[in-house]
Image (cartoon, coloured by chain):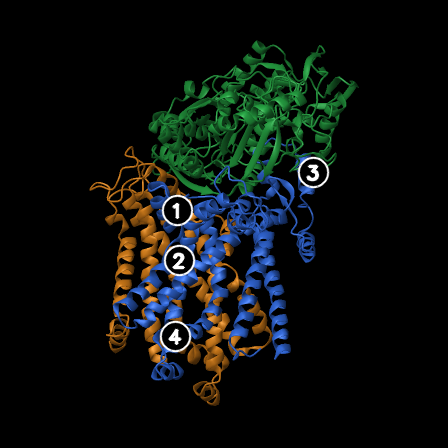
Amino acid sequence: MEIAGKIAEFLFGKKPGRGMMLFGLTIVLIVLIMAIFAPWIAPYDPTQSSDDVFAPPSGEHLMGTNRLGQDMFSRIVWGSRIVLYVVFIATLISMAIGIPLGLVSGYYGGKTDRALSVVMDSIYAFPALILAIVIAVVLGPSPLNTAIAISFVYVPTYFRMVRGQTLSLKGQLFVEAAHAIGAKNREIMFKYILPNLAPTILVVFTLSVADAILTEAGLSFLGLSVTPPTPDWGYDLRVGQPFLLDGYWWLVFFPGVMIMLLAMAFALIGEALNERVSLGTR
Amino acid sequence: MHGLKYASVNPMKRRYLPALLIFLMVFSVVASGCIGGGGGEEKTSTIVIGVTDKVTDLDPANAYDFYTWEVLNNVMEGLVKYKPGTLEIEPGLAEKWEVNEDSTVWTFYLRKDLKFADGTPLKAQDVVRSIERVMKIQGDPAWLVTDFVDRVEAKDDYTVVFYLKQPTSYFLSLLTTPPYFPVHPNYAPDQIDSDQTAGGAGPYMITKWVRDEELVLEANPNYYGEKPKTEKIIIKFYRDASTMRLALQNGEIDIAWRTLRPSDINSLKEEGKLKVIEVPGGFIRYVCLNTKTEPTSNVKVRQALAAAIDRKEIAEKVFMGTVEPLYSLIPNGMWSHKDVFKDKYGDGNLELAKKLLQEAGYSESNPLEIQLWYTPTHYGDTEADLAQMLKEQWEKTGMIKVTIKSAEWGTYVDYARKGQMQVYLLGWYPDYLDPDDYTTPFLKSTANSWAGTGYANPTVDELLTKAQTLTSQDERAKLYEQVQEILAEEVPYIPLIQGKLFVVTQENVKGVIIGPDMIFHYAHLYKE
Amino acid sequence: MARGLGQYILIRALMIIPTILILYTLVFFFLRILPGNPVMAVVGTKNIPPEQLEHLMEMAGLNKPLYVQYFDYLKGILHGDFGVTLAFPMGKPVWDYISQRFPATLELAIWAFTVSVLLGLITGVLGATKKGTKVDTSMRLYSIIAYTLFIPWFGMMLQYVFGIHLHWLPTSGRLDPGVDLHTITGLYVLDSILTGNWEALVSSIRHLILPALTLGIVLSGAYTRLVRNNMVDVLSQDFIRSYQARGVPDRKVLWYALKNAFIPVVTLMGLQFAILLGGAVLTETTFSWPGMGTFLVDRIDYRDYNAIQGAVIFFAFFVGVISLIVDIVYAILDPRVKY
């Protein structure tokens, strides 16, 4: 209970950025609900075509219909599943690779560390989207493949952060103390150093999720993420673009807004967390 | 010459009329005799054409895509050509020809006054050089020559003789394709010359070429035939159809050509400010079914899939009426075409499909599971919609479950050739206009490995080989009809739709003539 | 000191080599994981006999063992040879494309970069000087919103409003058709000025506005934050306080503060440039901008190994050079940097 209270205090306490945090969490919650309860929320089958094509937003179709007469609102609701799935899998993969590598590399140092750092820095410095495009094309369009392509470009983000922090923590008193009581290297890394990194990892996590949402949307926009008729925001934006000329703005407007709202929600949470974390360390 | 006159009326000129007159007088003295009745100082007439297709390779030894072929057709010419707007062969660079009894030796007599655009004379040796060049380079379309021609000889400066490998009744239609076009000596003799602009002896010549941006054609002064009605043609390359449509609506281009989206064509039609010209096209779309692997190796399954498809719904919904349903591999309007699939299955025949599926051992609780493949960019934006629509139609039977898969073009083609896909969408642009080109490459077991359906039927092979050698169209037609019946029975392919071509122009553009060969000859174009 | 700087630059420059190697290796093998190749993409559904297919593969050099292909291409790169395209058409130097497409991307990047830095400075300074007020909060929000703007969406909205609806600005391409421009550098604005071609100047600027704004605004968010935070830090430092105490005018104090706050911004620029190039792919696709991004996307469709490898290597090299320049500028600006 006490921990829960602490977390609640950490998240919602009267600290700077409370508004941002609340706003961000609300949006994320709404999208989560959309994803979980999609079958009950969506009024239509998102993949079912109908004769009612290019219907503008109305009571019947909240966000209008597209060229095949599919209900855009239903597609938006179901589309949340794909985005969340891809982004979380991608982030988890990159954390699972980046964090341990960063820890080991930073802790032991030496040649491996230098080699790894060069590789990671190279990928990090390269335009992420371009690399993701190349990988996504090769793997072919499916949510899991997209997640893998995206995870690839965020591994260095975690690696660099964790390695840097490990380097600076390595020399601190509590680590030396742990050595003194005979703790093994692995224990020190995962029991002593890692927990200290948790807040920073949390911040980087939310920020990289925000970024990954945009990357996923970018890949989908280029047609590299899902196959139809799977509802996906970025993909719907892509197929809606040609119809802007005919004034069918709703095909583009709503998917884009959803992408940005979700990305913004995570960015706001990250921002608020960041302030809390830096307050704590100062 | 209408266009030239109108384009010259321009207020600037009136003000400088006296000076102009003097200039013209001096000029006409100097130039008299050389120019004849030409327009003299008249402002050149120009028409701007927008396209989203690319010109890939200006070398006919390697170019193998429709739009590039069109450009080559405008800057080069073959020994024979199609009469504008028809499938009738008429003399081109050759003024007459003869053929031996079993159509294996073809002799062509060239015109005497032929010149390339820069004035270099064009002789029989140039024809031979160009064709041998194609055979040596072995570029993509080389088979159009090497599969048929054994050797080619220049008997004298004006006589070319082709010795063919086997009797080929439709050799003249082959001769209308770019690999047979004589090219300027500037083309590198034994390698691909992608950006060579020297061209051949066509109505136009290339005067500016910026890849992916702009191609400028001007009337070839040394062309033997009638001068083009419009002096200068500018081709603008667009990356996407929306941009091209906007440019047309803003009056930046006179003609929007290959390829606007169905939705764009529809809205432009409705708007009514521009002319939308519709031309029947010979390209076809179809579903390939792998006859070697489960479950499509079962002919009942293939028949069921064919029966459940509703082509009219596809044409209306996916292509917004810009295509027509197709019930055979031989396109509508070509001799020997028969609506075999319509007669046998009809459209959206769910009852029949269910019956066939039951016979094949499937039911609602034990549905047929298939993977439908498509490729996202090669056939345009509508491809994903087409796949979705097919999925929906098949699933309507309640006894089929469809998973849609996609792969980008380079991989897709490889999968197809290796027979690694089950049910997949492909399309076909004809190489030459003959039923042979719509049947042999699909159904003849020695020629259809590219499609990956693994289809082989000795009877069909025999019929097709026979049809190739016969010269009587009536006799050939009978054989092709037989082949189509077998196709509908065994269903290695399900024909879906046949494309139409759309040219959208400003009101004042006249002279759009596109024949069944789908090549736009710019020389007839003019502005009013 | 001078020698130190020289050495530093040399080491940093040498660091570009492993970067390129790593990216090349990654891309080389990634491209070859799946079946299919550029020859297939060209041949497509055409009924080409197997012997001819073999011949085409040979021409493209694709029948050699992988490691030979790998080192052959690498050898070429060392000589500045990016190979030839393998599809549509086969055999045209990749460098011809890069030299034609890159200036377009560079021009877009320069303008977007300028927009982003200017906007970032303005909003950042506003936030810092009005620290703690509503202005500050809204600038902070601006920074987050700008950062999360989805480029294609934002671009389309601008196209819709200013292009399709109001007809004020063109929505794609670099020049109006019919406008002739003699290119020298490939940067159209610069070329029009150099050749005194006013028609082309107006046309190219009009075409640049929407894409540069789209990309520039999206990237400005990161600067807003950094400038604001740095300005706040600097403004609270002693030397600024003493200026203020001595009665130096506010505007001048602000100028000093800005100059000092600018140094960390420079470090961000290197990283931002990589993000900018990624964003340029989306911007170029949205606005049909004939740059490296659209080139890469087109070539990926054809599986044109050499072109993709060439483009990626070129990107890596370019990003490396930019970050090198940024580091040098930073080293010169900030004497505290140790080499």
Q: Amino acid at mark 2?
A: Val
Q: Nearer the viewer, mark 4 or mark 1?
A: 4
The residue where tag 1 is placed is A235
Chain C visual colour: blue
Residue A60: percent from left, percent from top: 21, 40
For this view, does B93 lie left or right of residue C249? right
Q: CA distance from mark 4 to mark 3?
A: 72 Å
Q: CA distance from mark 4 to mark 1?
A: 51 Å
Determine if marks 3 and 2 fall on one subunit.
Answer: yes
Which chain is mark 2 on? C
- Up-down: is B325 above or below A228? above
The residue where tag 3 is placed is C55
The residue where tag 4 is placed is C252
Chain A visual colour: orange
Residue at horizontal 75 percent and vertical 27 percent from the top: B129
The residue where tag 2 is placed is C218
Query: Does the image show residue A149?
Result: no
Label 4 vs 3, first from the N-terminus: 3
Residue B338: percent from left, percent from top: 47, 16
Q: Are marks 4 and 2 in contact (CB under 8 Å)?
A: no
Q: Which chain is green?
A: B
